[in-house]
Image (cartoon, helix red, strand yellow):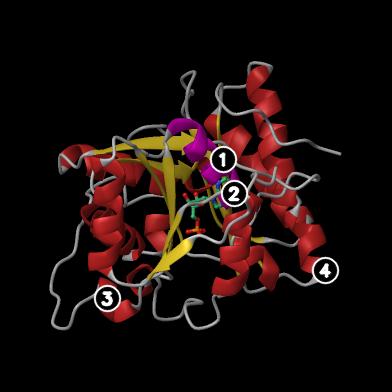
Amino acid sequence: MPDASGRLPVVFDRVAAFRVACDRVRRGGGTLGLVPTMGALHEGHLALVREAKRRASTVAVTIFVNPTQFGPNEDLARYPRDLAGDRAACARVGVDLLFAPSEEEMYPRDERTRVTVAHLTEALCGVSRPHHFTGVATVVTKLFAVAGPAIALFGRKDYQQLQVVRRMTRDLLLPVEIVGCPTVREADGLALSSRNSYLTSEERQRAVAIPRGLGRAARAFSSGERHAGRLVRMVEDQLSGARLRPDYVTIADADELSPFAGDATLPERAVLAVAAYAGSTRLIDNLVFSEDPPPRDD
Ligand code: AMP
């Protein structure tokens, strides 16, 4: 849905100037909708922008490939970067402000501070990415400190990140309202991700086993299955049938993210989360039973 003007948003690369622009929005009686991203924007990001436009008078997108949330052997160097393309995409959906700072701007020389959220970061992706969420919590705290009072929108695609950001914002008394938005999927169910661009066409076809497994488990849950291990196995069987290597398939408490044991009987609300490799590309997905619609299964 292109906006009326399609005007390119103003790009800020300095903290001080972006802060002034955000302050000006509020001083003029407006409200700020903030959409933090790492760029390579796709329809999932743009859905957050559209929701931000419904909820706030001015929308700011931030684009920053945050080095502290990548592990030493992860894809920081090859992460897709396309500021000109992202700016054009932002114009099409009516973004007002674009903040694209440098690494030096976000991490001043001799910086020593990290924000760590306990417990919520230990299970699921925290097992294989032990420093990831400290990087996320640190950079999001910095972005909130620059933007000031705002509504900030995050995707449920990164469910653990959403819970970590919610808790951090509450614990640190930050003046930001967190809004979680539904996962945007391709027609065959695969969740949109900037990392999908790494997939070969053959890997892309196999990757559909992730949403298919989630869908099977969700339908079984709807039909009354409450045995955690059996629901996990439905996803694992899909992954192995497609030769996707699981990092984890876990059912956890939807708020605290504490995993359920295999023989647990599940409550009405729980999150089923998956990370799996298609070739060397790590993909994540999830759904909350009784809350998220199952991805389509064709
Ligand atoms: P990223 O650029 O991957 O760090 O993502 C920036 C924001 O977009 C995060 O809040 C993500 O959860 C959200 N996001 C990424 N992919 C999707 C998707 N397929 N559907 C909804 N939100 C998404």
Q: Earlier in the sequence, mark 4 or mark 1?
A: 1
Give the residue at mark 4. 201
Counting from the top left corner in percent of width and height, residue 269 is at 47, 23
Q: Is residue 226 visible?
A: yes
Amino acid beneath label 1 = Arg
* 54 inside magenta stretch: yes
**Residue at 43% in and 71% down:** 65
Q: Quadrant of the C terminus?
A: top right
Residues packed near mark 3 inside 10 Å, few (<14), some (14 to 19) or many (20 plus): few
Report x, y in % for residue 31: 34, 37
Q: Residue 50 carries which label?
A: 1
Marks 2/4: CA–CA distance: 24 Å
Tell whether circle 2 marks a residue whose Cβ is less than 8 angstroms from ligand 1: no
Which quadrant holds residue 182?
Answer: top right
Find the distance from the CA under tag 2 to the CA under tag 1: 6 Å
Residue beneath label 2, please?
46
